[in-house]
Amino acid sequence: MSHGARVIRTGVSSGGPAAPPAATAASSAGSDAELMDGAYFRSCAGMLKVAQMISLLIGFISVNSSPWTDNSAYSYFQIVTMCDFVMILFFYIIHIFRIYKKLTCVSWPLAEFLHYLIGTILLLIASIVAASKSYNLTGLVAGATFGFLATILCVVSMWSSYKVSCITQSSSKYHA
């Protein structure tokens, strides 16, 4: 059994003193070794996603806990709010754990923009239908109100993801 040539890595360069082991380990640990992106929690986009999830959850709970007859409008509202909640949570996790850096085969800004486009339209329709069928029941009115609030927050996120994905790419194309 023959062994090939081995490379033994040392902390000594050909012309200088040896680097301390702690400094070498710290420089190789870098920002990629961190599991979570703590700065995204405090960023505007992160807080916007949290506000969207909270308003969707409050809207869902308001409609779910109010006494209403078996109306398909509220079932549609509940389905849209929960699907939108799950997708926003999905993109939040994608950003928190930096999965977008590992899965480069997906255009994450475009995927997020399309999610917000479709989700916002469906949420606006569901909120309008829920508001028109509420008949002054406070739980249903509150659910529709939080649905409209989530719609406004989703429009803001859609605009910011549009600015990031489309405007930034088109301006960098012309300046290159």
Image (cartoon, helix red, strand yellow):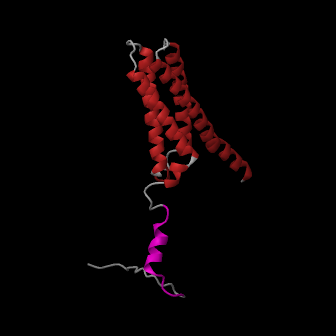
Q: Position of residue 33 (x, y in %)?
A: 44, 62
Residue furthest to the left in view is: 1
Which residue is rendered at x = 50% and y = 19% of the image? Answer: 141
Which residue is rendered at x = 49% and y = 40% of the image? Answer: 50
**Which segment did they paint magenta?**
16-31
The answer to whether residue 8 is above or below residue 158 is below
Q: Position of residue 69 (x, y in %)?
A: 38, 12
In front of the other: 103 or 161: 161
Which residue is rendered at x = 46% and y = 36% of the image? Answer: 87
Work out whether residue 107 can be spotted.
Answer: no
Q: Is residue 21 magenta?
A: yes
The answer to whether residue 156 is above or below residue 39 is above
Which residue is rendered at x = 45% and y = 34% of the image? Answer: 85
Q: Quadrant of the C terminus?
A: bottom right
124 lies left or right of 83? right
Q: Position of residue 159 (x, y in %)?
A: 63, 37
Q: Is residue 108 magenta?
A: no
Quadrant of residue 167 in the image? top right
Q: Position of residue 162 (x, y in %)?
A: 62, 39
In front of the other: 27 or 52: 52
Q: Quadrant of the N terminus?
A: bottom left
| Label tally | 0
Work out whether residue 150 can be spotted.
Answer: yes
